[in-house]
Image (tube, coloured by chain):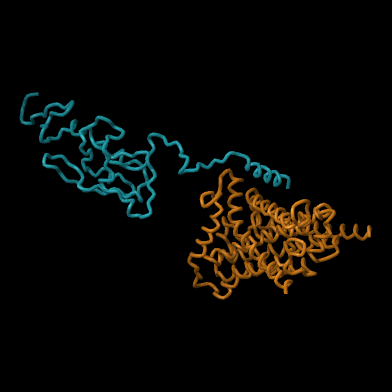
Chain colours: A cyan, B orange
């Protein structure tokens, strides 16, 4: 009986304590800089799309919310024909970011994506692409990759040795 | 003619005020629970969030009113109306201010006890008609709980009746002009408070609903306005028990300076807030503990209270 009255009193005293609620739209919580929120597609320092449409993000996605199709430019550079993320399915796990070999897909701290229409949660490539490099500055996949492009032959990339001639006997 | 008009005004005034209060309790309870749990509660819609009541009403009116195909349809529909009917009828005998009472019955307390007994039917029939084992268990618990607590709910009031010498609530309030009955009848007050808590099946005595065990118990099959009737019935029940505590033990409308109605209202609000505080603070007891607590402790205490009060009144008069 006494313990009941005591608990009544202690609960009553909560009235004079500080509220723990964060009044969200007016006050905002601190978000860590590496918070995993909305997904973006970044560009390389030259302003070209970083995405090479390798499908690794799509494969890594545990909820299958990423859809894309690869296509190729004339110089052999691959890029996604369309790139679609259904954010009503996305669980913001960041596996796509980990899987991405070119730093193209990145998660940024924005999480405010409420929509009245469910279809508006489906983001196409033009919604996902940003005009910057995101978290990784100065990285350009094609500068390192041993891929032959129009203005860059094999072995001409950075830190890249010239290709070995397999028919030569010389070491 | 003017007397009839006055009466009509009183009837509709009390009815309107009561339903407004019951609706407002949705907001009051949620705000208070929030305050006692270190949060804010609803504070967005309108000033201090008070229009949450309107939003809730609109929501509940537009919800699908579904009757399960396996339910006993007639009883299913009648059950929620009973509780509304009963609590509103009980309010008829409560004197709000001198002369402001719908029905100045000379057996006011007995009428209230009878009405609250009928209130059992609401939950029992709802539990039965839902044709669902959890609902049935809820109804079963309700009947057992009400049965055992009804007994000493009536007995706890007899001390007051002995001291006032009347069953009429206006007379009882007038008899408390010099001293509130809570002083000589403190035991009776505690017992009536606990019994009233069990009667309005609020936490911690919400065994018939027990969300965590019975999935809302007797009203788990109800939706829309039928559920709303149970809800409003519960809130009016809380105001009813508070109003009775005030009338019987805390001097009704008596109080200095402020007009009688305001005193009544303030005292009643205090007890309503106490009901919410109990809900915020106390855990639900086990079901058998509830019953044995009622029969083994509260019933003997209530009887003892009657004997002692009766003996003292006899000795001094």
Residue A30 in the image, given as x and y percentages of width and height = 45, 36
Q: Is residue B214 above or below residue A11?
A: below
Q: Quadrant of the C terminus of chain A?
A: top left
Could you say which is closer to the camera, residue B317 or residue A148? Answer: B317
Residue B139 in the image, given as x and y percentages of width and height = 62, 66
Q: Is residue B180 left or right of residue B19?
A: right
In the image, what residue occupies the spot 15% across and 39% down?
A: A77
Q: How many marks?
A: 0
Residue A80 in the image, given as x and y percentages of width and height = 21, 45
Q: Is residue B258 left or right of residue B215?
A: right
In the image, what residue occupies the spot 57% across and 72% down?
A: B77
Q: Is residue A130 left or right of residue B81?
A: left
In the image, what residue occupies the spot 55% across and 48% down?
A: B41
Q: Is residue B249 above or below residue B36?
A: below
Say whether residue B119 is visible: no
Could you say which is closer to the camera, residue A122 or residue B31? Answer: B31
Q: Residue furthest front?
A: B2
Q: Is residue A153 above or below residue A19?
A: above
The quarter of the picture where residue B39 lies is top right
Residue B66 in the image, given as x and y percentages of width and height = 49, 69
The quarter of the picture where residue B155 lies is bottom right
Say whether residue B237 is visible: yes
Could you say which is closer to the camera, residue B82 or residue B305? Answer: B82
């Amino acid at each position: 009986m006494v313990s009941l009255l005591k608990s009544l009193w202690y609960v009553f005293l909560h009235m004079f304590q500080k509220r723990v609620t964060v009044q969200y739209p007016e006050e905002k919580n601190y978000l860590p800089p590496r918070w995993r929120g909305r997904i973006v597609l970044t560009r390389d320092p030259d302003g070209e799309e970083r995405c090479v449409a390798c499908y690794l993000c799509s494969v890594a996605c545990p909820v299958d919310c990423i859809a894309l199709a690869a296509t190729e430019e004339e110089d052999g550079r691959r890029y996604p024909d369309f790139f679609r993320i259904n954010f009503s399915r996305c669980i913001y796990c960041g596996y796509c970011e980990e899987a991405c070999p070119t730093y193209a897909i990145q998660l940024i701290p924005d999480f405010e994506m409420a929509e009245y229409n469910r279809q508006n949660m489906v983001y196409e490539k033009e919604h996902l692409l940003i005009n910057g490099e995101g978290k990784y500055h100065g990285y350009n996949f094609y500068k390192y990759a041993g891929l032959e492009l129009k203005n860059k032959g094999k072995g001409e990339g950075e830190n890249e040795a010239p290709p070995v001639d397999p028919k030569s006997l010389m070491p | 003619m003017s007397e009839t008009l006055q009466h009509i005004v009183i009837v509709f005034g009390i009815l309107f005020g009561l339903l407004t209060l019951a609706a407002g309790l949705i907001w009051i309870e949620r705000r208070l629970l929030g305050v006692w749990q270190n949060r804010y509660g609803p504070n967005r819609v309108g000033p201090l969030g008070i229009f949450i009541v309107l939003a809730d009403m609109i929501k509940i009116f537009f919800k699908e009113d579904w009757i399960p195909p396996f339910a006993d349809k007639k009883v299913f529909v009648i059950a929620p109306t009973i509780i509304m009917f009963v609590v509103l009828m009980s309010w008829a005998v409560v004197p709000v201010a001198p002369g402001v009472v719908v029905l100045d019955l000379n057996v006011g307390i007995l009428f209230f006890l009878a009405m609250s007994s009928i209130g059992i039917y609401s939950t029992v029939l709802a539990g039965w008609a839902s044709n669902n084992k959890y609902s049935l268990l809820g109804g079963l618990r309700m009947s057992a709980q009400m049965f055992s607590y009804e007994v000493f709910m009536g007995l706890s009031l007899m001390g007051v009746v002995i001291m006032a010498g009347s069953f009429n609530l206006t007379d009882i309030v007038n008899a408390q002009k010099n001293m509130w009955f809570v002083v000589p009848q403190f035991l009776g007050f505690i017992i009536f408070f606990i019994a009233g808590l069990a009667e309005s099946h609020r936490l911690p005595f919400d065994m018939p609903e027990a969300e965590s065990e019975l999935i809302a118990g007797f009203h788990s099959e109800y939706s829309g306005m039928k559920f709303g009737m149970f809800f409003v019935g519960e809130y009016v029940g809380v105001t009813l028990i508070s109003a009775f505590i005030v009338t019987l033990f805390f001097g009704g409308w008596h109080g200095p300076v402020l007009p009688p109605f305001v005193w009544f209202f303030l005292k009643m609000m205090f007890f309503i807030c106490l009901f919410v505080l109990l809900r915020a603070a106390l855990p639900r007891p086990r079901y058998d503990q509830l019953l044995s607590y009622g029969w083994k402790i509260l019933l003997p205490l209530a009887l003892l209270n009657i004997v002692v009060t009766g003996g003292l009144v006899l000795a001094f008069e």
